[in-house]
Image: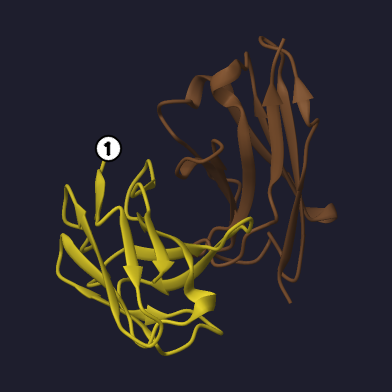
Amino acid sequence: QVTLKESGPGILQPSQTLSLTCSFSGFLLSASSVGVGWIRQPSGKGLEWLATIGWEDVKHYNPSLKSRLTISKDTSNNQVFLKITSVDTADTGTYYCAHSAGFAYWGQGTLVTVSS
Amino acid sequence: DIVMTQAPLSVSVTPGESASISCRSSKSLLHSNGITYVYWYLQKPGKSPQLLIYRMSNLASGVPDRFSGSGSETDFTLKISRVEAEDVGIYYCGQLLENPYTFGAGTKLELK
């Protein structure tokens, strides 16, 4: 059974760095063609893909945010991380991680609020 | 970026009747390998999105066969036969062909 769960700070101030963790089970990130992606959703709005990391450590970023994003993984502990630098109120929303094969499995999401 | 345009933005359906949602992409989603990289997701109220259809017409695991996907290279349709109360939510199409992956704005399905 594939499960993913996101964790984050909840609230942070503008200009800070947002650090998110995705803890997963039911699959191995070391397996061929496997990856994990991050998608976010501002409250009441649509979905925005942010980044994906693959089993071979290949990383893909949304060009609109690339300069602020860093995705990484800890294969031995089944975790994927996302950092977003210099956050502002526009980064407020729910952040999801998902199994990258068609985003077939999603976590429950973690709400992040950027506020001074 | 590939723009995904959904229509309608909302639809109201009588339980037991059918519903169709359209999605159009600004670029062909047909890869040279013959696969069309369009996906459909349902986000039920207060929940995470769930995959319904992958690669245009393939039913995801555990999804009722009342759901079906079809289309061409740029025009796609999600059809729900015999709508049930559990089908209420927002439906999104998405393209996973090229970076950045993009999604439509969503179609809200409600019951009459």
Chain letter for the yellow part: B
Secondary structure at numbered mark 1: loop
Instruction: Give the residue type at disc 1.
Output: Asp
Determine the colour of chain A: brown
Q: Nearer the viewer, residue B75 or A38?
A: B75
Q: How many marks?
A: 1
Residue under pointer 1: B1
- Above or below — where is B33 with respect to A91? below
* Residue at the image point whose x is 33% and y is 48% from the top: B98
Task: From the viewer's perspective, tell me whether residue B71 is left or right of residue B54.
Answer: left
Q: Quadrant of residue B34?
A: bottom left
**Left or right: A16 as drawn, with respect to B20:** right
Q: Nearer the viewer, residue A22 or A40?
A: A40
Residue A43 image offset from top left, x and y in percent: 56, 37
- Residue A5 vs A66, above or below: the answer is below
Name the spot of residue A36 as percent of width and height, x first. 61, 53
Q: Is residue A23 left or right of residue A104?
A: right
Q: Can residue A77 be seen at all in this image of the molecule?
A: yes
Q: In this view of the protein, can residue A55 be seen by the observer?
A: no
The percent position of residue A83, horizontal first and vertical second, equals 67, 29
Mark 1: few, some, or many residues within 10 Å (few <14, many ≥20)?
few
